[in-house]
Amino acid sequence: MKSAILVFPGSNREGDVAQAIELVTGRRPQMVWHGDGDFEKVDLIVVPGGFSYGDYLRCGAMAAQSPVMAEVKKRAAQGVPVLGICNGFQIVTEAGLLPGTLMRNSHLKFVCADVHLKVETSQSLFTNRYQAGQVIKVPVAHAEGNYFADADTMKKLEDRGQIAFRYCAPDGTVDGRGNPNGSSSNIAGVFNETKTVLGLMPHPENAVEPMFGGTDGRGLFEGMVEALS
Amino acid sequence: MKARVHVTLKNGVLDPQGKAIGHSLNRLGFPEVGDVRQGKFIELELAETDKAKAKARLEDMCKKLLANTVIENYSIELVG
Amino acid sequence: MTVAQEKNPPVKLPNEPAITPQIVAEHGLAPDEYQRLLKIMGRDPTMVELGIFSAMWSEHCSYKSSKVWLKKLPTKAPWVIQGPGENAGVIDIGDGQAAIFKMESHNHPSYIEPYQGAATGVGGILRDVFTMGARPVANLNALRFGDPKNARTRHLVSGVVAGIAGYGNCMGIPTVGGETNFHPAYNGNILVNAMTVGVASTDKIFYAAAAGVGNPMVYVGSKTGRDGIHGATMSSTEFNEDSESKRPTVQVGDPFVEKLLLEACLELMATDAIIAIQDMGAAGLTSSSFEMAAKGGLGLVMELDKVPMRETGMNPYELMLSESQERMLMVLKPGREEEARKIFEKWELDFAVIGHLTDTERMVLTWHGDVVGNIPIPPLVTEAPMYERPWKLTPLPAELDAAKVPAPADWKASLLTLMSSPDLASKAWIWHQYDHLIMGNTAIRPQGGDAALVRVPGASKEAGHKGAGHKGLAMTSDCTPRYVQAHPETGGRQAVAEAWRNITAVGARPLAVTDNMNFGNPQKPEIMGQFAGAIMGMAEACTALDFPVVSGNVSLYNETEGRPILPTPTIGAVGVIDDIATSAGSRLVKDGLALVLVGDTKGWLGQSIYLRELHGREEGAPPPVDLAVERRNGDFVRGQIVGRKVAACHDLSDGGLLVALAEMCLSGSMGATIKLPQGAIAPHAYLYGEDQGRYLIAADDGGALVEAAQKAGVPAVLLGYSGGSDITVEGLLSVPLQELRDAHEAWLPSYMNSAA
C-alpha cells in the first residue's frame, strides 16, 4: 500500500500516523507539503491531526482551501481513499468531502483521554478487520470534536450506514456517559456515501503498540493494507 | 473601502460558548440575561471602490472561507 | 578593561527625556547600581542604554542575589555534557543521544493574565530546549495555587491550565506529568513552573557563543511588537495593589508560529549553516544579543531599523526591550544567508539580517544610520552587581511526638477526607486537558506511575541502541513546600530525594536535575536564609545521589504586601531506562499480588498531610532524609524492577502508606487487604506517617522480594494482597473502591464547576 500524508503549517500528528502505517506496512509513507498540488499517485491519502494554521478562524477552514486539498478532492472523486483524523476530519468536512461539521466540545475544554468506540460496520475498506458492534479503546485529543449535522443529513447518514464509529461505554452501550464532547448521536467517525472517505476524531494511530496505548487501533491500518495492497 | 463581516451560528445550532457566557453573566448578578449567542467579527480593508462589486466579492469570501454555511450565517456591512 | 574606546558617542532621539533619578528608579536600578553604570559608561546613558542595563542587571537576568548560593550546587558528572549557563542542561543518555532539559518559572505574568502568562511560559521553555538543537519530547509543569476558598483561585486554575494546554497541545508536545498544590501562602503569588525535555544527537548540539568577526546576525520568527516591555523588570519586583493595572505588559503567545519556528530551526540545524543561536526570552533582543557576544568574546553592530516590526512608530528602546514571543537570534556562517532565508520563508516566518559581529567587544546600536547606543560588553557582565545578602537560617523545629497526635475518630472518614483534600484529590480534570499521548511514545501516563515514561525516538536497535527494547526517559517534578517552610535544609534535601525516588520507582536510573527556585523577597534575611538552607540541603542530596544540577531558574520577590510564598525549590528530574518493557507503573491491575512495604516506618507525623487536613495543624519538624538509606533502598527497588520481580511500585510521600495504597488501587481499579505488622507503632502513625525512603511494591512473589530485601539490608515487610473491590485494613477500615473513587475524583471538577 502506497500512502501519502499531507502536511500543513501546524500539522502535528503526521509523525504519529506515519509511524503507525510504517509499523503495519513496513513502508514509510510519503509526506506531502500543503503547497504541493501535484504529488505522486498513491493508494491512500491521509489528512493528519494537528492545528493547521493554528486552528484560527475555524478548525480546518484554511487548510481546506490549500492547493493540495484541491487535488485531494479531485482524487477522492475518482475513488482514491481518504482518511481524515482529528484536525484531518475537520479539514475534510470543511472541504466538503464529508457531511456535517465539528463544533467546540460541549464542555468547552480540550480533552485527551482513552475512549471506547463501537464499530458500526465492518463493510468498508477501513473497518474490515473489525466486527460490527465490536468495542475498541483508542484515545481522543481535541477541543472541537462535537459532530453536528442538520436533521436531514443525520437521517441520511443513519439510513445509508455512513456512521463508522460511535462513542460508547466499555460494555458497548451508546449513551451520554461514553461521549467525550457532546457529539450528535455519539458520532466519532463518518464515511462518505461510497465509504471511500473516512473522517474520525479519535486517534487509532496512537493505539498500535502494546506498551504505548494498546493495539486496538491497529485493525484500521491492517484493514486498509488488506483492502488496498 | 472597509468592510465588516459578522459571522454567527445559525438558530438551532447549539452554542456552548454562548451558553457559558450567559451562565457567567447570570452568576455575576445579571439575572435578566437569557439566551446568549456569540459570533465572530472580521474587519477587512478592500482595494475596491465599487460597492456592488465589493459586496459580491465579500459574499464569495464568506462562502469560501470566512463562514461555514453548514452551521453559520454571515452578514456584510460596507463602511465608507 | 581591554575594551575598545568609544568612537561614536550616541545621538539622542527626538523627544528623548533626560535621565533623572526618578527614571533610574523606575528602571529598578538602585542608586549605587546607577553609579556603577556611570563608571562603566564614562558618561550619562541614553534611554536605550539605561533600559539595557536595567534589563541585564535585573534579578531575573543577572541572578545577583542568588548566584553566590547557586555555585554551591554540584553540576558535574561523567554524563553531563552541559551544566548551568546555557539555554538548558545537556546529559548523555547513550547511543549518541543527549537529553536536553530545563524548568523555568512564569509566576508573575501568570498571576496577572493566567492564560497568556502560562502559555508563554510553556513557549519560552520549549524555545530554550529547541534552541540547543533538540526536538522537545515532553513537557511537565509544577503549579501552586492559593487557597481554593480564595476568590481568585478558580479563575487562576482555569486560565493557567487552559494556557498550558493551548500552547503545548498546539505545539504537538505531550504534557506528561507535573504536580499541583494549593496553599493560602500562594494567594497573591501563584507558581507556574514549566519544564521541557528534548532529545538531540550528541554531535548536533547548538550553543549561544558567537564566533567569527563579520559574520551576520540574523533575526527569525515573529515580528517585534510592544509586548512585555519591562517584563523582565516586572518579574523582579514585588506585587502590590496596582499590579492588576500592569496587564498590558504581559506577552501574548502564538503557538502556531512557535510550531513553525521549531520546524524551521530544526530544518536549518540539519545543515551546518548555524554558528550560534539564542532564543529571545526575558529582555528579548537585549539579553540574547548580549549573551551571544559576551560568550564569544566579541562585539556587535545591530541596525535596529532592520528588525521586523509589528507596530508603527516603534523606537530603539522598545525594540531592545520588547518581549514579543517566538523569536530567535542566530549567527550564520558567511554566505549561508540565502539558504537559511529560504527555509524560514517556506515556513512563512520573518527573516532579517540585522547586524554583524565585530572585534570591539562593544554593543553598537544604530537607528537609520545614527548610533543610538554604544555599550562596552565585558564590564556589563564582570562589573554586574552581585550580592551576598544577609541571611538567617530557619532553626529546626522540635520533633512532634506522634503520641500527641490523635488517631482519627472515624477511620473510613479519615481516608475519604484525605483522598478528597485539594492536594491529594485526583488532578484528572487538569491533565485530561493536556495532550499527553501525541508522538505515540508515552509509556507511563499521568496517574500511571511515579514518573512519566516516554520512549526515546530514534533509539531503535538500528540506530545503535544496545538494549533489545525501547529506551525510555523517565521524568518527574517534585517539591514539598510545607517541609521546606518548616526547615529549608530538610525540605531541599527531601525535594531532591523524592525526585530521585520517583525516577527510581519506575525502574529508571536517575541522571540529573533542573531546579526552579521560587522564593520571596531576598532582601529579608529570613527569606535569604530559606534560600541558603534549601540550597545546602539540595547540594547535599545531589552529591550523595550522584544527581547533578544541569540547569535552572530563580524566581524571587514572590510576595504580596509583605506576605511571602512557601519557599518552593521545585526539582525537575530526568532518568533513563534501557528497556521500557522492564519498567513498572503504580497501577494495581491484578489480584493476588503481594503488597510489600520497603523502607523503615517510624510513623513521622510532623508536617504531615494527615496532621494538616484532619487536625488543621502545620507543626513539627519535617521527616528527615537519610541519604545513604535513600540510596540503598532505591538501588534495591530499581534492581528488583528491572529484574522483573515487581508488578507495580509506588513511592510513599504525601499521606503516607494508606494514601499510596489507595492511589495504586484506584488507578488500577483493584482492591486490596492489608494487615498492620505485629508490634507496629500506633496505626495512624503507621498508615499516615510520612517517613522518607519508602516504597510500596506489588509482586507475584512477596516472599522472594522480602528475602531479597533482607539480603540487601533493606527493611521490607509483607502487608497483604491485592484483590476484591474494597480497600481494607484489617480491624480498622474497609472502603468500597467506588466510594473512594467518587470522593477522590469529584473534588476538582466540582470545585471548578461551582459558582464563584
Image: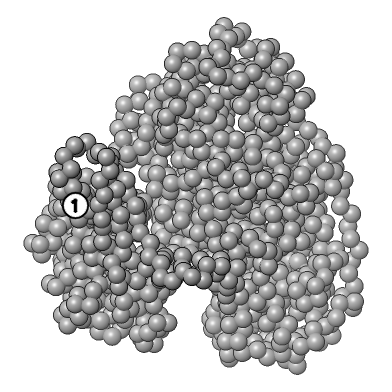
A135 on left or right of C520 = left
* Residue at figure coordinates x 8%, y 62% from the top left: A78
The image quarter containing residue B18 is bottom left
Q: Can the viewer see residue C234 in this picture?
A: yes
Quarter of the figure that contains the N terminus of chain A: bottom left
Instruction: Pinpoint residue C546: horizontal percent, then vertical percent.
Output: 69, 51
- Residue C575 position (above or below residue C207): below
Q: State the residue lying farthest toward the bottom.
A: C731
Name the chain letter of the residue that bears numbered label 1.
B
Residue sitting nearer the eye, C162 or C133: C162
Q: Answer yes or no: is residue A210 visible.
A: no
- The residue located at (72%, 34%) in the rendering is C64
Q: Quadrant of residue C310?
A: top left
Element on which disc 1 rests: helix
Q: Is residue A97 left or right of residue C57?
A: left
Q: Which residue is mark 1?
A: B59
The picture places residue C683, in percent across and down from the top left corner, at: 80, 83
Residue at the image point whose x is 72% and y is 90% from the top: C733
Q: Can you say whether C345 is above or below C728 in the image? A: above
x, y (%) of residue A34? 24, 48
Q: Is residue C7 above or below residue A213?
A: above
